[in-house]
Amino acid sequence: MGRKKSKNQLHTGGTANSATNVKKETPLPPLGNKLGSASFIAINTLTKPALFSFYDEDITKNEGNVYDKSLLLNASQLEMVPSSDAVKHERSLYAKIINFIAAFFILFITGILFPMISECLFDNDQLAKGDIVSFLKYGIIIKNRIVAEPDMVPDWAVFGTEGVIFGSIVPLVDYLTRRQRQPKTRSSAYKNTLGSFIRCANTLLGIIFGIRKIEWSSSLQASGAWSLLNIVLWLFFDGTLTVLFSGLVIGLISAFTCAQHFPQLSQTLYFIDFYFFALLMFSKLGRYLLN
């Protein structure tokens, strides 16, 4: 170890030696592309003990190297930590394919179950049991026209394909328009999760049960009340313009397609109400699976 300086040397040459030591300190090399030499000099000065100037140059030089190496090591370790954006982009093509196949089968099974729920909707006036499923059965009519042997393709396959289409409309519009998928809010109801889809499905079952059990004065009263309720449900569950306009378009298409067999205004409102909320429900599931 080095020897300690005498008191005379400290009083007479302390200032000069300190100045000499400061001048002999060379700036450290820049650390990567983020930290320059000026930053390293500041950090090095703050981390070195204040009594460095009282010891020989060989001691201070070795100690300074130890501090410099530790700083370089810590900074290099920070640079090696990947950012969150880099981690998100590391999903392999294999994982995306598996996710797409799983989403397809879940939407397909949901589409098969959906007509069974639709047949349960009727009231005590003009809407009979099974009327609301007429729009879904147009897929079977199209299948019988374009397929050479219609018996080879079962009806449940058509309903499953319609479920995939319903669940893919809103995610596809989101991708094409690149709009905000959900409002800027902290409410958990807007989040596209499996729980939000289950809440929508339970709400649909509750509406169907209420329309069946309540003694309405007319079908127009029931369908009109559902129309007003749909506005509140859209604001509560989603609130995006993509779902609003897509649901209105699907509802109007269903009402126009079935207008020949169901010309009453109350029946038209029923088709718009039902398929508007059905698209909202499928959009929650589709966004959860595909996004």
Image (cartoon, rainbow, N blue to C red):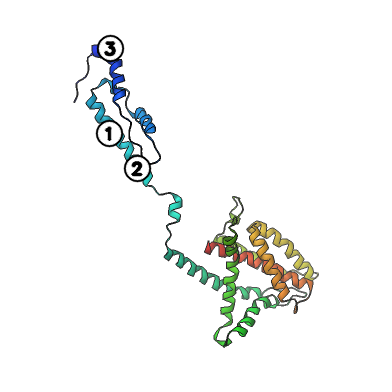
> x and y percent of residue 138 in the render?
65, 79
Q: Is residue 71 above or below residue 95?
A: above
- From the image, tell me which residue sits under label 2: 76
Where residue 101 appears, x then y in whole percent? 48, 70
Gap between marks 3 and 1 measured at Cα: 29 Å
Q: Residue at x 39, y 33 (%)?
A: 39
Q: How far is the residue under mark 2 from the one under mark 1?
A: 15 Å
Q: Quadrant of residue 1?
A: top left
In the image, 162: left or right of 212?
left
Observer-nearest of 264 and 49: 49
**Relative vertical location of residue 113 with respect to residue 187 in this rendering, above or below:** below
Q: Secondary structure at mark 3?
A: helix
Q: Residue at x 63, y 58 (%)?
A: 237
Q: Is residue 218 left or right of residue 250?
A: right
Question: Is 31 placed above or below 136 here?
Answer: above
> Is any part of residue 79 visible from this angle?
yes
Which residue is located at x 56 percent, y 83 percent?
154
* Earlier-in-chain disc, 3 versus 2: 3
> Residue 139: image x %, image y %?
63, 79
The residue tagged 3 is 11
What amino acid does circle 2 point to? Answer: Ser
Which mark, residue 246?
Answer: none
Q: Is residue 276 left or right of residue 186?
A: right
**Which secondary structure, mark 1?**
helix
Rendered image quadrant of residue 246: bottom right
Dot 3 crowding, Cα within 10 Å, few <14, some 14–19, many 20+: few
Asked if residue 112 shows in the view, the reply is no
- To which residue does mark 1 refer? 66
Towards the viewer: 202 or 3: 3
